[in-house]
Image (cartoon, rainbow, N blue to C red):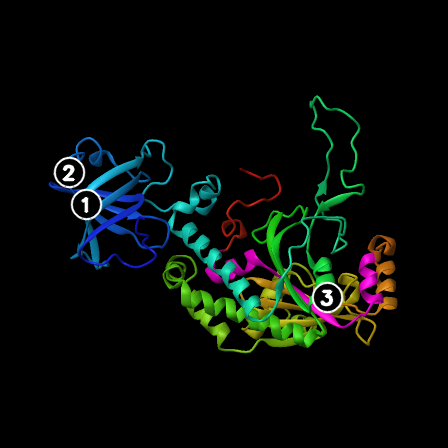
Amino acid sequence: MDIKLILTEPQIGGQTIISGWIRTKRDSKDFSFLEINDGSCLKNLQVIAARALPNYDTQVSRLTTGCSVRVTGQVTSSPAKGQTVELQAETLEVIGWAPADSYPLQKKRHSFEFLREISHLRPRTNSLGAVMRIRSHLSFAVHQYFQDNNFFLVHTPIITTSDCEGAGEMFAVTTTPKKGSPDQTPPRDFFGNPAGLTVSGQLQAEAYALALGKVYTFGPTFRAENSNTSRHLAEFWMIEPEMAFCDLDGDIALATDFLKYLIKSTLKNCPDDLELFDRFIAPGLITRLEGVLDRSFTRISYTEAVALLAKSKQNFEYPVSWGTDLQSEHEKFLTDVIMKSPVVVTDYPSAIKPFYMRVNNDKKTVAAMDILFPTIGEIIGGSQREEREDILLKRMLATGIDPDQYQWYIDLRRYGTVPHAGFGLGFERMVQYITGMTNIRDVIPFPRTPGHADL
């Protein structure tokens, strides 16, 4: 098996085999210096290819950025700055060529806008490769956290007949023949009822939390929202834990502990990749992440937040008033300017929140919470769920939800109901915050946005 660069720097002495792609090549009189990377880590390995190699003139001399190779040789100490070892090639096999006149990734910095146009090649760059390694680690850390805390993973449906948010932003699933297709039979509902791609696995997760105690989902979700901003995607991944016998305070405690765990785990396990972002993408990133671990999150009510924003006299694009939802500019002002720390905002007006959130004693607000992070705004949204059947029915009717379509959900309140709570973390938002990347399209392998579904 070939040595992967991520495991360890190859030991000095003995024969070593590595495989990877040429990042750069520099020729001298008697040698070529090849920087090779196999994608497993940020660092390259320098390979010294001597002119004495049998295929030097026919192949090695023609190598350019992007070519794939397999090299066998001896690991020796390196006199070069920034590396401790290098590989003295004994054989070098070219696996695949990458013609310089057409390969789009040359030795220079490319804009993220350009890289989005070649999404199949962009993970070969330092920045996007680092994003995906961190994303991979975060995915593992999510499962590690919940398994360590005795949660059960539940795979909730991607195709559903339930609109969790009630906002009508679901993509429809249909078997209608394409225009021009030889099959022009009348369209029908494949599932017997209109179905769509899920906007959240929360409602189904509640059913399993009320049987298994503590569950979580981690999967793709979809919003048919015509929003072409740096914060929105049409397809994204959500993490949604749900806990029986839990109130809003318990929900907030889990959410804050979970966020700190993910940050701490990434700082520990991805230092080289984080250093790249700290140097070139978001200066001060590591200090900012460490700061989150060292402080408590400020907790205020929605009413207090609105009062603070109004008192600031800031000229917002969207005016602030009680009863309207907080916009991203309000969230960032709260975290970046007023509090200078992560903020937990609770007890939102019921009129701007979904039907499933528990109504507070004041009858005007619900037991909801959003966690806001500096620079990014909302990163988690959650609530205690309404466990009282009569109040849930009233909320459904008030928000235009047909109870007949949600009898199964009402049954959860009819048969052994208990207080329960949960939240949703947009995975891409978390990757954005930890890497400092400013556009959400750059933290998911193949972004889906209005007008764009490439590959």
Q: Which mark is residue 89?
A: 1
In front of the other: 151 or 254: 151
On the image, the x and y values in percent for residue 218 come to: 60, 57
Left/right of residue 82 with respect to residue 320 in the rendered view: left
Which quadrant of the structure image shows residue 412?
bottom right
Q: CA distance from mark 1 to mark 3?
A: 60 Å
The answer, for residue 103, to whether it is visible in the render is yes
Sequence-earlier tag: 2 or 3: 2
Residue where numbered disc 3 is placed: 211
Which quadrant of the structure image shows residue 310?
bottom right
Which numbered mark, 1 or 3, is in the foreground of this view? 3
Q: How many marks?
A: 3
Q: Callout 3: helix, strand or loop? A: helix
Give the magenta range: 408-437
Which numbered mark, 2 or 3, is in the foreground of this view? 3
Q: Which mark is residue 53?
A: 2
Q: Is residue 286 magenta?
A: no
Sequence-earlier tag: 1 or 3: 1
Q: Amino acid at mark 2?
A: Leu
Q: Is residue 436 magenta?
A: yes
The answer, for residue 342, to whether it is visible in the render is no
Q: Amino acid at mark 3?
A: Ala
Q: Amino acid at mark 1?
A: Ala
Q: CA distance from mark 1 to mark 2?
A: 8 Å
On the image, the x and y values in percent for residue 9 come to: 27, 58
Name the residue rendered at 64%, 70% in the picture. Answer: 313
Q: Are marks 1 and 2 in contact (CB under 8 Å)?
A: yes
Q: Callout 2: helix, strand or loop? A: loop
